[in-house]
Structure formats: C-alpha cells, structure tokens
Image: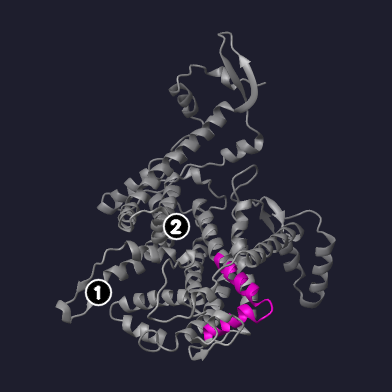
Amino acid sequence: MSGGIIPKPIASTSSFIDDRLGAGNFLKRNLRKIFPDHWSFLLGEIALYSFVILLLTGTFLTFFFKPGMGEVVYDGSYAPLRGVMMSEAYASTLHISFDIRGGLLMRQMHHWAALLFVAGMMVHMLRVFFTGAYRKPRELNWLIGIALLTLALVEGLTGYSLPDDLLSGAGLRITAGVASSLPLVGTWITFLLFGGEYPGGYVIERFYSLHILLIPGILLALITAHLILMWVQKHTQMPGKGRTNTNVVGAPLYPSFMAKSGAYFMFTFGAIALLGTLAQINPVWLFGPYLPSDISAGSQPDFYLGFLDGALRLMPGWEINLFGTGGGTLPLSVLIPALLPMAVIMTGLAAYPFAERWVTGDHGEHHVADRPRNNPHRTSIGICAVTFYGILWLAASNDLIAAFFHIPMNAMIYAGRVLIILGPILAYVVTYRICLGLQRRDASVIGHGVESGVIKRLPTGEYIEVHVPPSEATEAQLRGKAPIPAIGGDGAGAAPNGARGPLGRLRAKLSKAYGGEKVPLDGDHAHDEHAGAGSDTKDDRSLPL
C-alpha cells in the first residue's frame, strides 16, 4: 500500500522523467512500493549480490585466463612447478595467481562468491518452502527458482573444472563417467563434451564457453524474470498485527529499502572480500597439473556437488548386463547416484506446490506466509529432504572422517547406507513432534499468558510465577495461524469428483492427515501439559499483575 506525502526527491525525479519520457507516474508509484521488514526476506538478496560480485570478478579473470588444453612448459613465478609440462589453462591460472596484481584476490573472491551464491539460493528456497511462499500465485516463480538452482550447480561444475589442476581433473573424470553411463546417448554426450575419448582435447574450451556465455546469460534472464514476478505479485509477509492477504505492511522502496539493500550489498561484498583475503581456497598450485594417470587422496568437491560424490561412495557396485555381455552394460553404481538424488529433490520441489494443492483442495491466493511450525507435515518433509542431502554431503567426506577419527572405512560406508534410509524417517518424526510442541507452546501463551518474573505465594504455601497477557504484537503473530485446508469435512475445500474411486479415497485420506487444525490456539493443550506434569493450579497461573 502507499499514500501520504511524496518525498521531494521522488517528486522532483519523477517530474524530470515525466517531462521527457512520460514515465513519471510509473516511477512515482514504484518508488513508493512497500516492502515487508523481516530478516528472512534478505536471504535471497545474498544470492543476488553474490551473483553481481561473480559477474564483476569473472569479467576480470577473463582478461587473463587462456582456456586451452595445449601443453606448455611453465616458466612463471612459482618455482616448484618451473619446467613442468601443463595445459595452457593451468599455466594461465598460475599466472593469474602469482603474476597479475590482485589476481589471486580476484580468483579467491570469485570462488567464495560462487559458494555463497549457491548457498544463498539454497537457504532462500528453504525459507520459501517452509513458509509456504510458493503457493498461488507464486508457483511460476517457484519453478524459476528451481531452474536457477539447477543451472547454478551446472555453472559451478563448469567453473570448477576450468583450472585443469589435479583436483578439478578428478571432478572431470567423474563427469565423464556419469555422462558415459547414460543409456543410448552416453557415448555421444561424452564425445560432444570432450571432443573424443576422455580426456579429449576440447573440454576446457567448451566448458569455458558454457561458463562465461550461455549459462550466465540464462541465469541473468531468469533472475530478471524472478524479480519482475516478485515485483508484480508483491512480496509475501510474515503474520503479525495489521497484516492480511490484501495489504503489505513495511517500508517504501525509497529511501528505506534502497538504503537497507545498499548497505546489505556492501556488507556482502565486504564479507566476500575478507574471505578472499584471509581464507585460502582452491590452492591449485599445491595440486599440480592434471594427468589422467594421477589421483590424490582426500579430494573433496565444492559443497554443492558433495551429494553426488557421497552417493557414488555409498552405492553398491551394481550393474546390469543387457542380453549377456554382448548387449552392453548398464552401470547402476554410477547411473543411480548421478540421477536419482538430484531427481528426487528437484522433482519433489517442483511438484510440491501442485501436490499440496491437490491434497488440500486449496485454490486461494496466499500473501501472508506461514510460520513453519503451523504446517508440521510440510516442515517435516522439508527437514526430511535436508537430512537426505546432508547425509550424502557427509558421506562425501567419509574417507577423511575415517582417517581422522580412526574409524574403519567399511563401517563408514555401511553406516551411511543405513542412515540414508533411516535418517530422513527419523528426522520427519522428530520434526513433526517439535512442531506440535511449539504449537502447544503458542496455545499456552494465548491461554495462560507469558511469564512476568513476579513470584506469588498462594494461600496453600505454593509459589508460582504470575503470568500476564502477551503483547499485542505477539498475540497478533500467534493468531495469524490459520487451519490447513482439507477437502470436505470442515468446508475448507470442495470434495473431489469421483471421491468413491481409489484415487479419490487416497486423496481424502491424505487430506485428512495433512490438513486440519492440529493444535487449536484456544484449546486446553497448555493446561493439559501442566496437568500432565502433576500441577493442579489453574486460574492463579494467569492472574494479571
């Protein structure tokens, strides 16, 4: 919402533009656009600002990097590698690191910004998922976000491989193995990427073109579309006093949000610059040039690709020989880890808004976000996926864990295989119970107030702490909870056609379990908890001061 007196800078600027372009009203209206004020809404800006820093530092690096696989003899400043044969890509990476003023700083800032870019998108998507901000009318923006994350992983892989050192070469070997394991098209894709049998002679040039031209262009287009849709549909807001589906409570774009965003960009830039200065990352000179015959122990990919490495380590050596040994081999030990975890997570994320709408029958628009505790099944499913990803990520370091903690490697592998199945189930159960406990706590605050710090002695001699009503803002936040829609029953959604069929009965059961009110705010749950603890005090616990 907007209104009130228009600040002089906005009025004068809009008048200047209106006199020349006729766009003054557009500028005036959008500069007064209201943005909600909540710390979690800034998580997406971390990814956005990291992307800007990636473009700036990447442009600097393109001036000096040579994406070639032709062999040269190194004669640069790094003495331990002088006289060693290496690719032009690796030699130019060493040249940037040791002979270009500020080159090492730019390389390290670029790498840290890439990590922060992916991490920022992941955390932002978790915020959107746990608060239900993907619901109507934002399903398209949610799908764009999933495409952005997927492309960011590919962008990270191509950039990670460019230095052509021993560590990135090991990653390229895995890439070649995954590509060649694909049925029917695997050999063609491998030859297309590598220009022949691995390691080929063109993979660096082709990855370079993808890394600096094609993928960044698509990312930039998708980010623009993502921001435009967010602008048009307006931002979601957390529940609170005066916040509804028909308004936005917060501060205007100018000057409040601009000042905040500008400061946040400088903070992000400063943090990445500080990391690039003080925290060494990817010291390629220690790994040496890549040779297909060499491999190093304890090699680790960047964190966002750790799930693939972990899945490959946990997967048994299964394979299928088609029509005997003459029909070809289907290496399930590579194919399943390469495709299944990514497919489960990304496909699940893409389908979830539509699956939830089908289960609940909820077709209304939602502009007020949920607190994660108020939709326990959704939150539990999200934590289940995070646990699945985290176990794979941990498995990518099982050799280092085994070495440092003196644990047998086989024990680490078998433990990982068990945890990858039981871990998400346990996480689901524990998260669901925590959400219900937090809801009961909210009901207790509504029904019995909050602790005042005042101790009162009852006529019976018992000492209790006096409770007082919660603040108006706290009560508004708690009462922003709404029952989860469910088909039929409470009338929140229409009963599906063909409900007597197997699919209709399944939908009804899922809706009954997923939807509805789990812990009513005005129920007796808070008193039940006290009673279960052996207390028989009732009204005295809610006395005002």
**Rendered image quadrant of residue 82:** bottom right
Q: How is the image coloured?
A: one colour
The residue sitting at 61% across, 55% down in the picture is 41
Q: How many marks?
A: 2
- The residue shown at (67%, 21%) is 545
Left or right: where does residue 517 sit relative to residue 470?
Answer: left
Crowding around mark 1 (Cα neighbors within 10 Å: few <14, some 14 to 19, many 20+) is: some
Give me the disc on residue 286.
Answer: none
Above-or-below relation of 256 to 212: above
> Which element is circle 1 on?
strand
Quick one: SS at disc 2? helix
Residue 35's spot in the image, x, y percent?
Answer: 67, 56
Q: Which mark is residue 353?
A: 2
Figure check: 80 above or below 418: below
Q: Quadrant for residue 98, please give it.
A: bottom right
Was residue 99 drawn as part of the magenta stretch in this picture?
A: yes
Which quarter of the rendering shows the N terminus?
Answer: bottom right
Identify the residue at horizontal 26%, vertical 67% (top origin): 317
The residue under label 2 is which amino acid type?
Pro
The residue positioned farthest toward the left in the image shown: 324
Residue contact between numbered discs 2 and 1, judged by CB atoms under 8 Å? no
Residue 330's tag is: 1
Q: Write down the region rendered in magenta.
A: 89-115
Q: In the image, residue 299 lies at what x, y percent?
A: 44, 68
Q: Is residue 55 left or right of residue 165?
A: right
Whether residue 297 is visible here, answered yes or no, is yes
Residue at (37, 47) in percent of width and height: 511
Mark 2 Cα shell of 10 Å, populated few (<14), some (14-19), many (≥20): many
Residue 542 is left or right of residue 345, and the answer is right
Amino acid type at circle 1 is Leu
Asked whether 212 or 346 is in front, the reply is 212
